[in-house]
Amino acid sequence: MESQVELRQLRYFVAVAEELHFARAAERLHMSQSPLSRVIRQLERDLGVVLFVRTTRRVELTPAGSLLLERTRRALAEIDGALADARRLTGAGSGLVRLGYGPFNGAAATRIAEVLRSGRPDLNLRLEQEVTPDSLRRVGAHELDGAVVMESPAAARRFAVRVDALKDEPLLAALPRSHRYALKAAPIPMKEFVSELVLLPREPAGVLFNAWLRGVLRAHGFELDQTVLSASAPWDRRLPPVANGEAVSVMVGDWASDLDSSLVAVPFDPPISFPSDLVSRWPPSEEATYVVETALRVRDSEGWLTERPPRMELPED
């Protein structure tokens, strides 16, 4: 008899396949690890195939698992889109635009929201802050119409979303006011920065950003050897360990005009740019189209892209 696979099993499978870590997938799904493992084992029994190779150190997709992941993402996106369209047809949720943003993307999201509302004063707009991996997942599941996120390679194909380059934001070093480079109000060389204890966002929420920052510094020949993770996630712009002189950290340029008196922000030498993208649901809804058109108009009129050319990626690219 042919096995009946549930949507719930497939959603759980996608979470594990994308995280390649059962504990992180369970956290993302807001459940404990043991029942998640049982669901995946049952799915493998129902399908008669092995989807994951599990060792004590890592989880990897088998060829069958990779194929199922690619097809399942597309299928779930279509199902979620159909459900959303059905709700919209009956008036459920009509007029609501949901826009996500990350801890470093608040200024861009707020500016886009202002222009969205100016064009449609009666618009019901909801801004939701979360870290980039969660925003990507929710846009792909059509729970958000769009989100301003940090640049994420292969996001279009991985999450079945549209991706548009949006903004290049200066990344600054956050220093205690007593720091020698704060007193000089001079750019801090990367070599000097990495010699300090550096505060990073707490993981797993901060994994993507931390990997990006390490990669940027590594590209210039430096490694982050001395780090400490923040007590909160997502990012707390007050940065208490920095304010207390215990560490240094980073912040985006948009924060520099609203700093606590105990903090100083200075550029890096050489400069670092933090890249943000706009991700939107695909296929697009009326709301997603309005968000994209507005955001790109703001991007171009205000010169947000200073390091990268405008680009657009679709899942099939």
Image (spheres, rainbow, N blue to C red):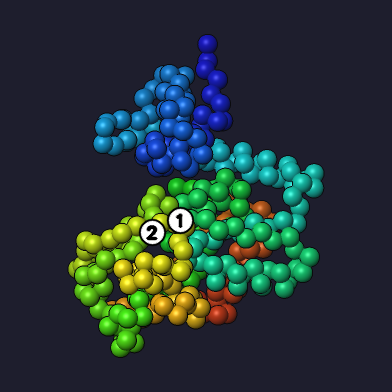
Which of the 4 image quadrants contains residue 47? top left
- Residue ID for mark 2: 230
SS at mark 2 in the image: loop
Describe residue 176's horizontal placement relative to residue 224 as left or right.
Answer: right
Tell me which residue sits at (26%, 66%) in the image.
Answer: 197
Describe residue 269's horizontal placement relative to residue 294 as left or right.
Answer: left
Q: Is residue 27 or residue 13 the one in the foreground? A: 27
Q: Position of residue 279 (x, y in %)?
A: 53, 58
Tell me which residue sits at (32%, 72%) in the image.
Answer: 245
SS at mark 1 in the image: loop
Q: Is residue 117 or residue 131 the one in the foreground? A: 131
Could you tell me how far apart the alpha carbons at marks 1 and 2 are, in whole angstroms?
7 Å
Tell me which residue sits at (72%, 73%) in the image.
Answer: 118
- Residue ID for mark 1: 233
Q: Is residue 68 visible?
A: no
Q: Which three-letter amino acid code belongs to the residue tagged 2?
A: Ser
Tell me which residue sits at (35%, 30%) in the image.
Answer: 52
